[in-house]
Image: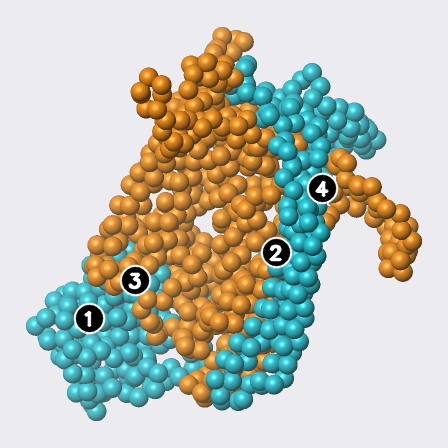
């Protein structure tokens, strides 16, 4: 197998004598076997057909070049396909064809080279294994001594160890010097307090509930029993920071039979004739909770499967979320459109440290 | 770093034009760069051959593919969240408002020839990259290739794995489509759940309230500058240490801890590895030409309100997503007016501890064995039963978190309830690794016993002969020395004996080590010794 049998007699755990001298590293709790079976050394080399028969070698040679030629054809084909099959605006089929033909051409261009090279190495290049000796990772005793000497000299010539005042002030300065860089990142966010922002949404007394995304107002009479509406506050679409506002103000509107709702005393006037509005932002980590099961009146969050029971004021009945979805108090205005009675009475969305303050 | 006998007798030939040019160019370079030294040192470096050693190569090559395709994408991608109205070729989204990032990604997909191909090459290569790093890590772990002198390289490899996931996540977030925004929303919610600093950290990351208009630009800097720069640097050190430490090799006849047996870089390994790079590249392009990945045009631009059930993050983020799902209900506290989101903290702690244990494992095992020698022979997993069993337990733990990330799909597919699947995963997350540990250990010890049996008595040949006395026996085929060597050459440890130190004391450290080492090496199967072989032969078979 290998051409060179030096060192084949060594044990499975090496000696690395050259580097460690008389002080070999400890073997810890390894068992040192006295009558270990000896390493048999390399088995004899088994030649391949291409080593034995020149005509077989020539055959493989042709095969390798054929693969390289296929590669050239593939690459040229890719260029041709790029030109011959352009993308026709509006025609998705043309995108697909372009993608496919270009891709297949490039694939051939690459695989031809790849398989050719590997085949070449396997059939025609020298098949002998070679042996290289390891010498232990650490430096020789002499090298290590030299390295120690370098440090000793450096220390002596600079007085780094001796002049403690210099050393300590330098370390101090090096520790303090990166701090401005930390401060510089303060303005990644505006000056305003995030906690204040998290407390308020666009909802306010009298703001109409409108359809998401069209923004058309909703009449209470349009909300039939069992139906659910995705809702945004009126005027949201005109806001500069539309997405940030929507990320807090998105609401789900449902109508249940009034007798199905278990309404607590302080929320008696928060629903309108069985129509209830709940924040759509999951109290776990903030996904939109939008899967409404009409029969059970459960809301399911698709992200981590928290479930909220609408008949019990969106109490969590399963999953990692802890708090119920905040309820938006609603009523109707003179024209019969649904409006908010106020903003949410607590922050919506995921919990955060200062939430209760 | 010498290689032995690498030249063969050459027949003297007139130098051809090509040879003269090579000679001139080599001389030109060497006189200016001293490159001949490097070529001498590295040119005939030996690489052992084993399929599992290619996993790291796959990772390296897919990373190069990522660099190439990613650079192409940067020429067309706009990392901006400024709102624009889409007017490109994909009709269903015409007239819809979206960020420049989303719009440019759609343009890459539908209006730039080869753009879709490059996007898909980039994404498929990213998936292959992370998968191959994971498998590469498993191979290092299960063969004990992390032992001295390679502990530091294990840490660097671990860093690469984390960076790869970071790159994957930031890349996934760039197109600003519905799924990427939803992923960021989850990150925002998790960050907000960190005590004391969470709210502000999220505020700083997003440059204001979620989602803001900064995040894509910021992630872009991380994705194409910081991440790749650190990755390339770490990869460089990783490969440098590989050259210094050289490859491990499996036990085999002629293989010792003091040598490396294999093919030289020039020419065989260069041809094989170079060819393999093109094969990996080709396979990725082939997949990208036939299979769609991340069809953002189906998802649409990010909007905090809509959702679709059954959407999944890229697979490598799954374990974290699964961990979030498995937290039992109600884990949130209020402490003096502050909110403590244990349902998020627990996930951060469990995942964090898991990763730290993975990172530190080589040091833990090194401390237990106290073995300071260098190890270059890769273990067969069965010969380190407890290590292998711990690995199996870790894999099971990860797999359970990962499975939990698909709890909804599992539930619908197998017609189970969501609750049932989650409870099942919760139980299996704890019980699964324990079972995996014991089963794996048993299997390893069983295989070791079988190896011992075979080394001493040979294989059952299936050939029955009738002895002159009329009795039938099955002939055992003895192993030859070369085959036997593979079965008997492994290392054996025994539990630490507690001994008082010089001052007559027994330290806590020693007690701990003794306990840990007896856990590791109690059920040891010693390798067959020469004496045993001889006596078994004398016994006559
Ligand atoms: C290990 C490293 C990397 C990983 C795992 C990775 C992964 C990803 C992923 C999963 C995407 C989403 C692609 C999609 O739309 O489906 C992406 C996007 C992108 N990546 Fe990378 N990437 C890496 C390195 C790079 C590098 C080095 C560059 C540039 C030199 C780059 C440039 C881009 C660009 C411009 C995009 C956005 C364009 C688009 O989404 O189509 N990436 N990356
Ligand atoms: S975000 Fe709703 S369950 Fe996690």
Mark 3 or 2, nearer chain start: 2
| Left or right of B279, for residue A216 | left
Rendered residue at 41%/36% (across/down): B390
Under circle 1, the secondary element is: strand
Label 1: chain? A
Q: Which residue is mark 3?
A: B409
Callout 2: few (<14), some (14-19), or many (20+) C-alpha neighbours within 10 Å? many
The numbered disc on residue B45 is 4
Q: Which quarter of the picture shows residue A180?
A: bottom right
Please identify, in this view, whether the residue under mark 2 or under mark 1 is nearer the observer.
2
| Dots 4, 2 in contact, CB < 8 A | no
Inter-mark Cα distance, 3 to 1: 18 Å
Circle 3 chain: B
Q: What residue sits right under mark 2 in the picture? A: B276
Q: Between tags 3 and 1, which lies in front?
A: 3
Residue under the point 20% across and 76% down: A254
Which dot marks residue A293?
Answer: 1
Q: Nearer the viewer, mark 3 or mark 4?
A: 4
Q: Secondary structure at mark 2?
A: helix
Q: Is mark 1 within 8 Å of ligand 2?
A: no
How crowded is the residue under tag 1: few (<14 C-alpha within 10 Å), some, or many (20+)?
A: few
Instruction: Find numbered disc 3 in the image and state the secondary structure of the residue it sits on.
Output: helix
- For image coordinates 50% across by 43% down, the residue present is B139
Q: Circle 4 marks a residue in which chain?
A: B
Bin the neighbour count of mark 3 within 10 Å (Cα to Cα): few under 14, some 14-19, many 20 and up: some
Question: What color was chain A assigned in the picture?
Answer: cyan
Q: Which residue appears farthest toward the bottom when viewing the image?
A: A335
Label 3 to label 2: alpha-carbon separation:
36 Å
């Amino acid at each position: 197998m290998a051409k060179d049998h030096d060192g084949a007699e060594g044990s499975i755990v090496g000696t690395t004598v050259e580097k460690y001298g008389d002080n070999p590293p400890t073997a810890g709790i390894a068992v040192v076997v006295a009558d270990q079976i000896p390493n048999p050394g390399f088995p004899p080399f088994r030649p391949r057909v291409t080593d034995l028969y020149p005509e077989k070698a020539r055959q493989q040679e042709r095969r390798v070049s054929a693969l390289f030629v296929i590669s050239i054809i593939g690459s040229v084909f890719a260029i041709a396909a790029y030109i011959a099959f352009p993308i026709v605006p509006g025609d998705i089929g043309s995108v697909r064809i372009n993608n496919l033909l270009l891709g297949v051409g490039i694939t051939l261009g690459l695989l031809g080279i790849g398989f050719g090279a590997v085949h070449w190495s396997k059939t025609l290049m020298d098949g002998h294994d070679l042996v290289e000796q390891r010498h232990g990772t650490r430096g020789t005793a002499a090298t290590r001594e030299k390295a120690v000497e370098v440090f000793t000299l450096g220390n002596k010539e600079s007085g780094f160890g001796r002049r403690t005042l210099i050393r300590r002030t330098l370390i101090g300065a090096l520790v303090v010097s990166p701090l401005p860089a930390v401060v510089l990142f303060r303005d990644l966010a505006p000056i305003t307090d995030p906690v204040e922002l998290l407390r308020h949404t666009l909802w306010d007394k009298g703001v109409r509930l409108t359809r998401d995304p069209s923004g058309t107002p909703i009449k209470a009479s349009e909300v039939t029993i069992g139906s659910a509406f995705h809702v945004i506050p009126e005027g949201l679409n005109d806001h500069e920071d539309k997405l940030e506002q929507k990320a807090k103000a998105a609401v789900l509107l449902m109508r249940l039979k009034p007798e199905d709702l278990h309404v607590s005393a302080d929320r008696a006037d928060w629903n309108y004739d069985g129509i209830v509005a709940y924040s759509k932002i999951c109290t776990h980590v903030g996904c939109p909770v939008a899967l409404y099961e009409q029969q059970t009146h459960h809301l399911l969050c698709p992200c981590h499967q928290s479930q909220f029971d609408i008949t019990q004021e969106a109490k969590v009945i399963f999953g990692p979320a802890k708090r119920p979805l905040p309820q938006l108090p609603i009523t109707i205005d003179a024209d019969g459109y649904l409006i908010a009675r106020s903003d949410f009475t607590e922050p919506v969305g995921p919990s955060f440290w200062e939430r209760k303050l | 770093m010498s290689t032995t006998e690498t030249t063969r007798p050459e027949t003297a030939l007139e130098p051809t034009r090509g040879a003269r040019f090579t000679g001139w160019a080599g001389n030109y370079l060497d006189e200016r760069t001293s490159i001949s030294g490097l070529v001498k040192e590295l040119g005939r470096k030996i690489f052992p051959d084993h399929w599992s050693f290619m996993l790291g190569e796959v990772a390296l090559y897919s990373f190069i593919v990522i660099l190439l395709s990613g650079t192409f994408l940067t020429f067309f991608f706009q990392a901006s969240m400024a709102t624009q109205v889409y007017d490109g070729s994909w009709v269903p989204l015409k007239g819809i408002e979206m960020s420049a990032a989303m719009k440019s990604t759609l343009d890459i997909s539908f209006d730039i020839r080869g753009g879709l191909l490059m996007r898909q090459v980039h994404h498929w290569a990213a998936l292959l990259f992370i998968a191959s790093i994971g498998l590469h890590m498993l191979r290092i772990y299960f063969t004990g290739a992390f032992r001295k002198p390679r502990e530091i390289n294990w840490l660097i490899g671990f860093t690469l794995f984390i960076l790869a996931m970071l790159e994957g996540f930031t890349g996934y977030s760039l197109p600003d489509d519905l799924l990427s925004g939803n992923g960021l929303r989850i990150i925002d919610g998790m960050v907000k759940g960190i005590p004391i600093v969470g709210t502000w950290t999220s505020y700083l990351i997003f440059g204001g309230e979620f989602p803001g208009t900064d995040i894509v630009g910021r992630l872009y800097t991380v994705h194409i500058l910081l991440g790749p720069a650190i990755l390339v640097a770490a990869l460089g050190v990783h490969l440098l240490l590989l050259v210094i430490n050289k490859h491990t090799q499996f036990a085999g006849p002629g293989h010792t801890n003091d040598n490396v047996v294999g093919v030289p870089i020039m020419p065989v390994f260069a041809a094989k590895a170079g060819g393999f790079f093109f094969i990996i590249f080709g396979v990725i392009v082939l997949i990208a030409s036939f299979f769609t990945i991340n069809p953002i045009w189906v998802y649409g631009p990010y909007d905090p309100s809509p959702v679709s059930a059954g959407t999944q993050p890229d697979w490598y983020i799954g374990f974290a997503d699964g961990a979030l799902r498995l937290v039992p209900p109600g884990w949130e506290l209020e402490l003096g007016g502050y909110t403590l989101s244990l349902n998020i903290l627990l996930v951060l702690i469990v995942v964090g501890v898991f990763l730290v244990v993975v990172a530190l494992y080589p040091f833990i095992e090194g401390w237990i064995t106290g073995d300071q020698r260098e190890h270059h022979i890769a273990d067969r997993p069965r010969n380190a039963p407890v290590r292998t069993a711990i690995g199996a337990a870790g894999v099971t733990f990860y797999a359970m978190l990962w499975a939990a990330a698909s709890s909804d799909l599992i539930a619908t597919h197998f017609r189970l309830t969501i609750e049932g699947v989650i409870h099942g995963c919760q139980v299996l997350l704890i019980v699964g690794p324990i079972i995996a540990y014991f089963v794996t250990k048993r299997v390893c010890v069983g295989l070791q016993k079988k190896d011992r049996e075979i080394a001493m008595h040979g294989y059952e040949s299936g050939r029955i002969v009738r002895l002159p006395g009329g009795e039938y026996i099955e002939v055992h085929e003895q192993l030859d020395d070369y085959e036997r060597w593979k079965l008997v050459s492994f290392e054996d440890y025994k539990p630490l004996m507690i001994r008082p130190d010089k001052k007559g004391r027994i330290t806590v450290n020693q007690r701990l080590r003794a306990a840990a080492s007896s856990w590791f090496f109690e059920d040891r199967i010693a390798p067959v010794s020469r004496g045993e072989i001889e006596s078994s032969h004398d016994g006559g078979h």
